[in-house]
């Protein structure tokens, strides 16, 4: 079991962020680009982004709850500013969720981990490799990560690079949704990658939610 994983209370975070009022947030599920990303067979990343205070975390929690109700496989994470939580720990949290939901993942991972001669899961390269291998067994699923901008620049670079590598290594079945503010480094990385689905939150999108 990855060390200090209890620091990331992903279930509590989901409960805290699930504040959508009745009838709000549905516009995202009905967005054509979101639907194409959700229904695609090929692995891809969707980037949900907007200014501070536009309700990104509430939207992400709404999507997670919706996917859970659909009964699909999902692992999720709400990032927050915490220097004691490394990128490797965040990736390990996602892997652990897969392990809990599918015992076959553990059986598939054991020989892979043994080959690393006990390399520590606190090392980003090892955590990323184990995460990718877990996804190969876990099968068609969704990975949802909120608030990338809450991570320090170097930490989120490592996380985004790991996600982009994962999409290359597992070319089908993995849909990754990331949210953030419009930070320059994230804009540069995501917009130069033609496989990333751009989900920009506009005032027109959220005006129907305001006041509900």
Image: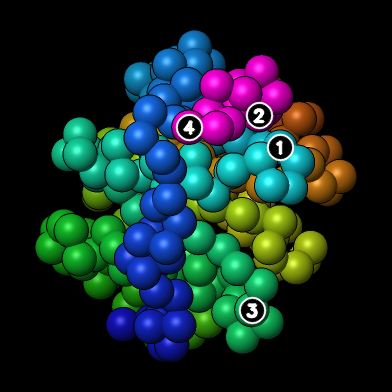
Q: Which residue is mark 1?
A: 50
**SS at mark 1 in the image:** loop
Q: Which residue is mark 2?
A: 201
Question: Distance from label 1 to label 2 (Cα)?
Answer: 5 Å
Closer to the camera: disc 4 or disc 2? 4
Question: Distance from label 4 to label 1 (Cα)?
Answer: 20 Å
Classify residue 134 by image quadrant: bottom left
Question: Distance from label 4 to label 3 (Cα)?
Answer: 33 Å
Question: Distance from label 3 to label 1 (Cα)?
Answer: 22 Å
Sequence-first disc among 3 and 2: 3
Question: Distance from label 4 to label 2 (Cα)?
Answer: 18 Å
Sequence-first disc among 4 and 2: 2
**SS at mark 4 in the image:** loop
Mark number for residue 212? 4
Closer to the camera: disc 4 or disc 3? 4
Residue drawn at (41%, 40%) of the image: 21
Closer to the camera: disc 4 or disc 1? 4
Q: Which residue is mark 3?
A: 82
Determine whether 106 is above or below 2 in the image. above
Q: Residue furthest left?
A: 103
């Amino acid at each position: 079991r990855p060390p200090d994983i209890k620091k990331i209370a992903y279930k509590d975070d989901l409960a805290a962020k699930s504040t959508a009022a009745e009838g709000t947030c549905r516009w995202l599920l009905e967005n054509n680009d979101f639907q194409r990303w959700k229904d695609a067979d090929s692995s891809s990343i969707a980037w949900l982004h907007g200014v501070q205070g536009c309700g990104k975390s509430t939207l992400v929690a709404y999507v997670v709850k919706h996917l859970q109700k659909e009964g699909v496989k999902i692992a999720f994470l709400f990032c927050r500013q915490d220097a004691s939580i490394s990128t490797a720990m965040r990736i390990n949290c996602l892997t652990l969720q897969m392990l809990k939901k599918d015992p076959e993942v553990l059986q598939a991972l054991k020989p892979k981990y043994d080959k690393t001669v006990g390399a520590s899961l606190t090392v980003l390269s090892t955590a990323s490799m184990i995460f990718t291998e877990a996804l190969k067994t876990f099968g068609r699923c969704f990975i949802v990560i909120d608030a990338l901008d809450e991570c320090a620049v170097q930490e989120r670079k490592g996380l985004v690079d790991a996600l982009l590598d994962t999409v290359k290594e597992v070319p089908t079945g993995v849909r990754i949704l990331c949210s953030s503010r419009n930070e320059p480094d994230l804009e540069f990385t995501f917009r130069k990658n033609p496989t990333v689905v751009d989900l920009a939150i506009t005032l027109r999108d959220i005006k129907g939610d305001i006041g509900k």
